[in-house]
Amino acid sequence: MTLSVLKRLWPIIKKEFRHIRRDKRVLAVLTLVPAALLLLNGYALNFDVTHIRTAVVDHDKSATSRDFIQSFVSSGYFDHVKNLRTSYEATRLLDNGEVRLVIVVPSGFSEKLLARETVDVQLLVDGMDASAATTIVGYAQAMVLQYSQRIILQAMSKIGRGSYIPVNYEMRMWYNPELKSARFLVPGLIAFILAITCVIATSLSIVKEKERNTIEQINVSPIHALDFIVGKLIPYALISLVAAALVLLAAYFLFDVVIKGSVLLLFFATLLFITAALSIGLFVSTVSDSQQVAFQIAAIVSIAPTIILSGFIFPIRSMPWWLQVLSNITPAKFYLVILRSIVLKGAGLSAFWEQGVYLLLYTTLFLGISTLRSRKTVG
Amino acid sequence: MALHRIIALWKKEVGQLLKDRRLLPIAFVAPVIQLTFLGFAASLDVKNIPIVLCDLDKSAESRTLVSSFTNSGYFTLSYSTEDYGDIQRYLDNNMVTMALVIPPSYGEKILRREQATIQIILDGSEGNSAAITMGYVNQVVMRLSTNILTEYLGGKVPAGRVDGEVRAWYNPALKSRNFMVPGVLVLILLVTATVLTAMAIVKEKEVGTLEQIMVTPIRPLEFMLGKLVPYTIIGFGDICVVLMVMVFGFGIAIKGSIVLLLTISGLFLLTTLGIGLFVSTISKTQQQAMMTVIFFIVMPMMYISGFVFPIENMPQPLQVISLGIPMRYFLVAIRSIILKGVGLSTLWPQALILLAMGASILVASTLRFRKKLD
């Protein structure tokens, strides 16, 4: 039976492959660009904040205040670019983005410290980029705390008590010890690329036949509507698999990302996700009459959720609860959990069988809906 | 060039846009949906970090340590375990992102005035969150150390201390949403304007109507204007809709001048339309045009324009490339106008660069377009 199905599908698959092959750019996009994107990801996606441009308003102008500021500079995170006389000047510098941090040391800084009082140092940070600002605040607070600790320790040894730091911590970083962004992003990137190739490319290629009315020619031919659709989907599924493999290879050679878990599991999970994405693509094609519309709908239902809601870049945990619920509409969310578990953690099926089951249900549901719809619209 | 011919083309284009019942609603509804989702989801804030506690000491001192973590506001105690080997399970299954391990002799060591070492295990797979978490751990532990020292000295502090009083300008609560939403606006504008323009022109090629138009007296330049103007209007419509959602939906007020904002958006629109036109000259099918835009224009721009990832942290070559990306200047301008409220006196370089880029891209693609047709 399978053989006869394949025999029926073969001409359609061949036709679609020919279309794709003739279109060299689409083929190149589908296979090579993913690897190039990975390169960009690996180098550009870097949230580290170093060389924070810092201005200083030193109202105290004492050896102590200079020492305090020097502790910022010598940490390597802060670049002392400017000295200001008043806090007013800080406004202009922050406005045009010349500096990201202004440290205001109050007058009487050294005297108060000598008098064993607490001194407030103002840290004015450009909060526009909240994520970077959070990191900057973290570093600055750490510097201030360290300085406080240092003067306490100095004072202790002066009065003859042994100086020591009571609590120390030992940090262990699991799964991604060097905190390489590439490692975290590779799975997301695979999901993203698959979403684009499967959802958009398939929906556009089906709608194209509608637009040119070639679909009616096919309808009057002996080809069954379902065969036609399946035949059209298979080439894209194959190409997507190749693209996914290329990304993994590139990740291995460029960023030393090794698949820790089972490759076989990875293959089946990817196949499952591709089917899910194709079923969405099919659904999109049934609701749109032109490629422009198909693209827009596909962007809303697949690209946007894959980038935004899947946890690719933005952690799902930080989202409001209703979005966390809504994030379940994108199969990429579940595929990502599976991918990260396999690639980064080397976990087995027990760690993500729920996600697998969900993907399966999702695919069945969508495939069912769009088959029903396409029978109605195509047939 | 004849105006009446261009007007006839506009009529045709608008007619086509209206005929496609889905296109127009989608062109306006899609940005709103995208902005709403992105605005709420695009948060890089790291809060309520779930931790698993493995307290092997169970002393008053270890409890103080734990509460200094939970009271910091950064961490939430999700699970507790007495089995060190159990930690792996919690981290593997994404139940927590951090484990706090207190060794058996912790309390004793603190009382004996010796240094005690605790262990922190972090899930490093989300590099950014992990780095921020590290910073939080560092702060909590240092603060605790200082407190213990002060206590040890009987409250008689031998020295003063310095406190950092942080003031975040433009965005006091440090919500990443305020940074992301204007960025999303730019992204939406880029995608809609570029993709729709490119596809609209390629569609005529694909269906074969382009040749029919070219045998009429309509000149290529007129045809181009006829195509671009409707999409410029759609682009501006999108900006207005998205700005309204931003102001009323997200409560992010525009601190600067709206006129300036719209003017600079117009300049940016020039570059996106130009790019769309250019893509149409190198694409034969709509599928090709769409893929070219997404993969060769939108994705790289998203990465190296400073949309999410700070440009300063990129390697030198990428920083140089980003200088040639119009979106970079528009992002700076739009964020500064909305969040900082600065005016043209600060933003004139960005405006000038956008104007120059828009004009040159548009002229270059027009020339290419004409050559291709003639």
Image (cartoon, rainbow, N blue to C red):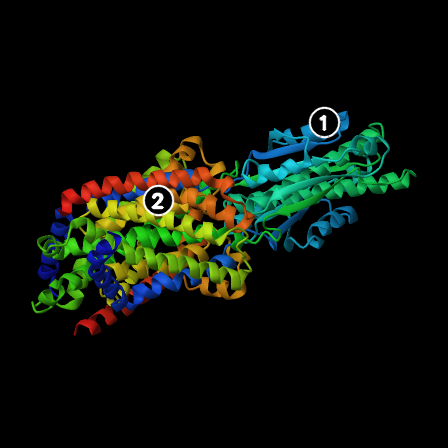
Secondary structure state at the residue bearing disc 1: helix
- Say which of marks 2 and 1 sits in front: 1
Q: Does residue B351 appear in this view? A: no
Q: Which residue type does callout 2 highlight?
A: Ile
* Residue B79 as seen in the image, left or right of residue B332: right
Residue position marked by numbered label 2 in the rendering: B258
Q: Kindly check if marks 2 and 1 are in contact, taking CB atoms under 8 A apart as contact.
A: no
Secondary structure state at the residue bearing disc 2: helix
Residue displayed at 43% across by 59% down:
A245
* Residue A330 as seen in the image, left or right of residue A67: left
Density class for disc 1 (Cα within 10 Å; few <14, some 14-19, many ≥20) is some
Distance between the alpha carbons at the discs numbered 2 and 1: 54 Å
| Foreground pick, B30 / B344 | B30
Residue displayed at 29% across by 68% down:
A24
Measured from the top left, where is residue A100 in percent x and y? 57, 49
Measured from the top left, where is residue A155 in percent x and y? 85, 40
Place residue B77 in its image quadrant: top right
Are the numbered discs 2 and 1 placed on the same chain, yes or no?
yes
| Foreground pick, A306 / A350 | A350
